Structure formats: C-alpha cells, structure tokens
Image: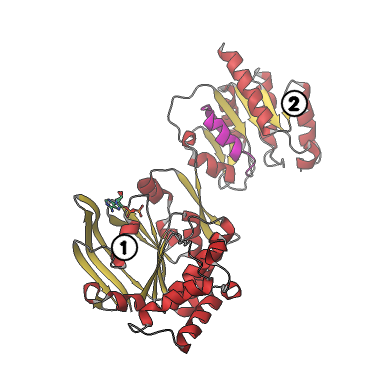
Amino acid sequence: MGINIDELKFAYKDKEVLKSIGFDTHRGEMVALLGPNGSGKTTLLKILAKILCPDCGIINIDNRGLEGITPKELAKEMAVIPQSFDTTFSFTAHDIVLMGRTPHLSRWGSEKERDFEVVRGAMEKTNTWQFKDKLFYNLSGGEKQRVIIARALAQEPHILLLDEPTSSLDINHQIEILATVRSLVDNENMMVIAAFHDLNMAAKYFDRILLLHNGEVYADGPPERVITEENIKEVFGVDVVVKNNPITDSLYVVPMAKACVRKSKPRERVHLICGGGSGSSLLNKLDQDKYDISVGVLNMLDSDQETAEYMKIDKMVLEAPFSPISYENHMKNIALIKDSSILILSDFSIGSGNLMNLEAALIALRHKIPVLMLDKRRIEEKDFTDGRATKIHNELLDNGALTFTSKRELLYYCKMLLSERLR
Ligand code: ADP
C-alpha cells in the first residue's frame, strides 16, 4: 500500500516545473522532499493533494488512479499540513481538531460519539488534549502546529503531506513536531511526505530523501546516500562539509564560507604547525584572509589534515597515521617553512612523536622568519615529553617567538606583520 508516481509532468502556463518525476513510497516511510527554493516541492505536494492537476503522468494511491478518487475519499486517505495556519475566529483547539472529522460526516449530519473519541485520540497523540479548551489564536506557534497535526489525524488518514512544517518554529518546537510525526510513522504505520529545507533535521528524522533538481528526482535514498558534499554542491550550489555526528549517529552538514574555496591568487605564505584539531579554525581564518597556506608535519587521519585536505591545501607534509615524524618529513617541513613569511604554531599537545615540529620553529627563527605561538594552555599542560618541549618553548621565547592566548590577537598580529612587509 502506498503511492506510485511515474513520468509526472507539470507546468504553470509555459513554465515547466516538474519535467519527469517518478518514485514509489509505502506506509511506514518518512520521506523528505529536498531541493532549492523553486525546485517544485510545493507543486508536487499540491498535485498529490489534487489541488493542481498534472499535465501528464501516473499517480496511484493504494493502486487506485488519483484522478478517479473523489475529494471526500481522498480526505479520508490523506491529510495536508500547511506551513502554518491561523484564524481570528474564537475557535478552541478542540473546535479546530473537530473540523478534521468533516470528510466522515454525512451531508447534514452532526458529529457522533465516535467522532469525539477520534478527536480525543488525535489530541492525545499530539499532546494537545491539555489545552483543548484554549482559544487557538492564543496558543504558541509550536502548539498551533501540533493542533493542526491533530486536526489532520482526526481525518484518520494513512498519508500525511507536510509543506515545510517547521519553517516558522524555533528549534525546540521543530524537534517536538518532527518527533511527533516520526512517532506516527513508527507507531501508526503512516506514510509521511514532507517538503523540507533543513538538511540536518532531514538527515536526523527522515528515512528517505528525494532531492529535486531541474524538475527531476536528482537523488533518492537514505540520508547518507543523498546528502553528500557532491550532491549538495550540484543542487544547491554551495560548498559544505558532511560529517557523521558520533553522539546522534546522524549526518550533519556544515556550510563552508565562500572564502574557503580558494579562488584568487594568494598573497603571502603562512606556514601552520598544528595537530589534533587545534589548527582547523586557524586554517579557516587564514584562508578567509586569502593567505597562501602551507601545513606540516601532520599525521594522516588527523582532523586538521582532513580540514586542510578539504580546503585543497596542496603544500602539506604528511606523516603516516599515529607515527612519529621522520627526519625526511622534518626536512620537508623546514623547506616549506623557509619559503614562508611567517610561522604559526597552534595550541597543540606535544609528545615525543611531534617534538620535531617545535624544533622546526627554532630553525624558522634562525632564518629570521617570525614565529607566532597560540598558547591558550600553559606549555607545561601540553608538554608530554618530560620537560623537553617546555625547554624548547622557552628557547623559542628567548629567541623572539611571540606568544598569544587568543586566536584573534594572533591573527591580528599576523596581519599587521605581513602588511608591514608588503609596504
Ligand atoms: P518550492 O516549493 O520547491 O520552493 P514551488 O513548487 O513553490 O517550489 O515552485 C516551483 C516554481 O513554480 C517556482 O519557480 C515558482 O515561482 C513557480 N510557481 C509556483 N506557483 C506558481 C503559480 N501559481 N503560478 C506560476 N508559477 C508558480
């Protein structure tokens, strides 16, 4: 039991919006329609709800052609939840939900015992029964939206269509609504199709994503197959990083600032020594300031290495994962440092494996390359070498290295130094 769509086409006059849409969905599935504004998500929902008539194509609902289903029959099968709904009339929350029973009433008939039972059940499932007697227009945005879901449930449908159901809500209410809808899919075997714009929420709550692009289904599948950096770049035209959140075990998408994508010819070279995630935001900031960046020595699989890789930094000295820095890589690092105008050390922890990175900073000073160190922590707190790192750190300070406790100050100083050099 479900919806089958094939070769669906629709145009507003001569503006072709849906060119060829095809997909099948079944009960117990929560499907998000994603795509940029104007990609036809609302239009598709309106066609499914029989508000618009397609130019051609097949739509079957539970194996029946949509064209042969009367509006009253459809209202018992499917309910539509708009972005928001308001009224200035003095309806209580209960009155609004009772309106959902309309398709089940005979022409001149009034509500019966069962209608009131269904309304109560719908309000309990959506946690709205406690304010049944309150005036609808006095409720908060999230409460109103839950009442509207209750009204939809009172229709006793199998299919819920939602058009950006959380777009006007704050984060708490968004979570509340999506969790309510999720439980309807899991516990009542309902099918949900929702136009949606929040990629992170879609990844967390939906089973399946249909990504619309150029009037077609560009990608269709579980979030991890559809929400990829390549697909988002192609469809939305933005650079993002897609990661897995280890706590929620769902994807999250982080948009990258436009300046992170290296375009213009860089100016001065800045070399960064970092590791363990201590350098990622510095890399980002240096990139936004359009410096030519080199990095080393970093272990492969280090999160700073992943960031540098993403930013397409090609001047990078890499060591094997979890291995100490080899002499050969140390020398490569020094070669990059000598080609730089400035050396920055992020607030990384120092063990015997990366002690050479600190020694490289001493060599930089010998070659008159300014060294700026981010020391948010005292050196003793990040020294895991029985004092050897502390000794070199002190030597660096004695030889003119500068230490900063704030990233902002360090970057400001870096900018000043480099602009003086350019004069
Ligand atoms: P989405 O929901 O993905 O933002 P829509 O389905 O609302 O997209 O709109 C798809 C395209 O159709 C847009 O370019 C929009 O401007 C256009 N459109 C929507 N409604 C109408 C209408 N009633 N008349 C003409 N064009 C429309």
In this orientation, which residue lies closer to the viewer: 140 or 11?
140
Start and end of the magenta stretch?
A: 277-296
Q: Position of residue 308 (x, y in %)?
A: 53, 39
- Residue type at numbered disc 1: Lys
Question: Does residue 46 appear in the picture of this structure?
Answer: yes
Tag 1 residue: 46
Residue tagged 2:
396
Q: Residue furthest top?
A: 423
> Height in image: 177 above or below 14?
below
Q: Secondary structure at mark 2?
A: helix
Is label 1 within 8 A of ligand 1 (CB to nearest ligand atom)? yes
User: Which of the pair 239/3 is nearer the observer?
Assistant: 3
Amino acid under label 2? Leu
Q: Residue at x 34, y 58 (%)?
A: 42
Mark linked to residue 226 = none
Q: Quadrant of the N terminus?
A: bottom left
